[in-house]
Image (spheres, rainbow, N blue to C red):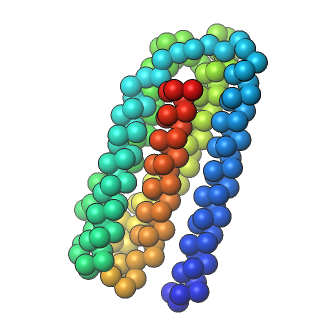
Amino acid sequence: MNLIQNRALKQLLWIGIGAIVMFFAGLTSAYIVRRAEGNWVEFILPDWFLFSTITIIISSILLVFISKKIKRDESVFQLMLIVFMLGLLFAFFQINGWKALTNQGVFLTGEGSNVAGSFLYVITLSHLVHLVGGLVALFITAINAKRNRYNKDDYLGLELTSTYWHFLGLLWIYIYVFLKYF
């Protein structure tokens, strides 16, 4: 690809990221406003969400190493698979976090539900939906790495995937801190 196409793709990614930021800003703003109205049930955020946070940070750190390796024309396939597996582990931890919440009596909807729990599920599920897109990108990037489609002069797909995954990690850290301490 030429330089103009590369810049265009990067700009499109940043526009998408901007839209996602606005979406989550809206959700967390609604959370703040609704919480101030009262009838808000307090609950303990399960440790599974902390495990998710640690997992996504590790995966992001690995992507930094991958970026350095590709610039030295080294193979990155195995590390890409590890990052992909860490992404799946993140999703597994999220699902276990939701199970722990239901064991606490915190539900998305229905009898016994409260708006506090509903917000938590909507925010975390929305992040997981965006993470699925990241998992698809990681998987495709790993396949491309296996096929030696990236080298020190041409690794745009890896760069775009890494940027999106780092963004998802930062977004999750924001969500985790917001839900844990607000």
Relative to 129, is 156 on the left or the right? left
Relative to 138, is 111 on the left or the right? right
Residue 146 visible? The answer is no
Q: Nearer the viewer, residue 163 or 134?
A: 163
State the count of labels: 0
Residue 26 visible? The answer is yes
Relative to 9, is 80 on the left or the right? left
Residue 18 occupies quadrant:
bottom right
Can you say whether 41 is above or below 32 in the image?
A: above
Residue 114 occupies quadrant:
top right
The residue drawn where x is 53% and y is 15% is: 43
Tell me residue 132's x, y (percent). 51, 50
Can you say whether 82 is above or below 158 in the image?
A: above
The residue drawn where x is 48% and y is 17% is: 44
Tell me residue 48's x, y (percent). 39, 29
Image quadrant holding the C terminus, namely: top right
Tell me residue 47's x, y (percent). 38, 25
